[in-house]
Image (spheres, rainbow, N blue to C red):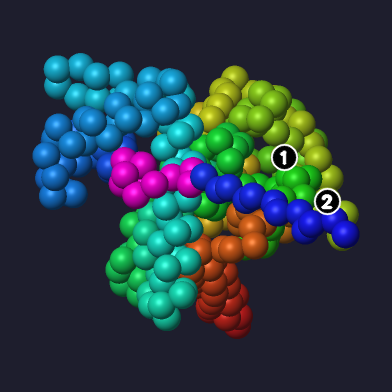
Amino acid sequence: MNSPRIVERTSKRQFDDLMLGSIELFCLAAELESFTDAATAAGVTPAAVSRSVSRLEERLEVRLFVRTTRRIRLTDAGRTYYERCREALGQLLDAEREATGQQSAAAGVLRISMPTPYAHYRVLPILPAFREQHPQVRVDVHISNRNIDFAEEGFDLAIRGSAPGESNLIARKLEDAELVVVASPAYLSRAGMPRSIDDLTHHDCIQFDLPSSGRKIPWLFKSGEQVQEYFTEGGYSSAGDVLGGVTLARSGAGLFQTYRFVVERDLATGGLVEMLPAFGGASRPFVLLYPHKRHVSLRVRSFVDFLVETLGSARRDDATSSLP
């Protein structure tokens, strides 16, 4: 009879307590851009922070910081490592809170990317209300019209004009933002008012270039239930920031199509005048995107719920106030 086979199982810890502590100190130094400030915040010596970073660099065989006499900055490899470590430490903290029943309060850093108009006219004005409800959440806002990489850049959320075809992203529509063509009274007194879409060929129409492709974005008009694209021409073009076209329109440069919520005050005060209202009603969407993960942190869930509810309530209030 054969003797039972004994299988030896060996295990090796990937991260001991010292290495985990080194990662925490590295992230703190990266966030504060200073070994000294990180040491003060952590209650250790600057030498301890320096040793921790050196320990990580030796393990990874890459340089994480560029050091000068006055400051430190992350290398490209260091930036990638920091973003992943920051996310991992946040998930560990969330898991600990859940396990101990302390996850009733959202906490940590929330990184969100959003385009210029939606940031300034929709989200930034309501962020103080969110932090009043969740004071332990620090909101890190990046205002940009470019498409971001969640994995590489460490963002929690993004707001964009459309949902990409990536299956690993959850998309929640925030609104269909109405478009409107506007011009200043000074421009209209000089060039006259267009009465039809065809009249736009005789006007200076301010262009906006799409950040993703560089091509000029078409204007949208609604005829009945059909939405039609119309490519305009003009002597001015704005790239990267759609608010540049609004400023040009306010200055009398020409006609511009933008979101109604951006120019509501201008229209109310007469600083801008709406053109071609008979062909209005077309819109473009704004979508909230975040990675599809098994574990979504409470700070992300809290912000998603807050944004959807707050913006939804604001739009319902706007609609009610416009009723006769």
Q: Which residue lies furthest to the front in this view?
A: 1
Residue nearer the viewer, 252 or 26: 26
Residue at the image point whose x is 19% and y is 24% from the top: 71
Q: Quadrant of residue 278?
A: bottom right
Regarding residue 157, the answer to whether it shows in the image is: yes
Regarding residue 200, the answer to whether it shows in the image is: no
Q: Height in image: 268 above or below 73?
A: below
Tell me the residue that label 2 is attached to: 227
Tell me the residue that label 1 is attached to: 219
Q: Which of marks 1 and 2 is nearer the N terminus?
A: 1
Residue 23 in percent (x, y) is at 36, 42
Give, as a single range, the part of the protein colored magenta. 13-24
Q: In which quarter of the image is residue 129?
A: bottom left
Q: Height in image: 61 above or below 117?
A: above
Secondary structure, mark 1, is: strand
Q: What residue type is labelled 1?
A: Trp
Residue at the image point whose x is 46% and y is 34% from the top: 81
Relative to residue 41, is residue 190 drawn left or right? right
Judged by its main secondary structure, the magenta piece is helix
Look at the image and tell me in which quarter the C terminus lies: bottom right
Residue 294 in percent (x, y) is at 64, 62
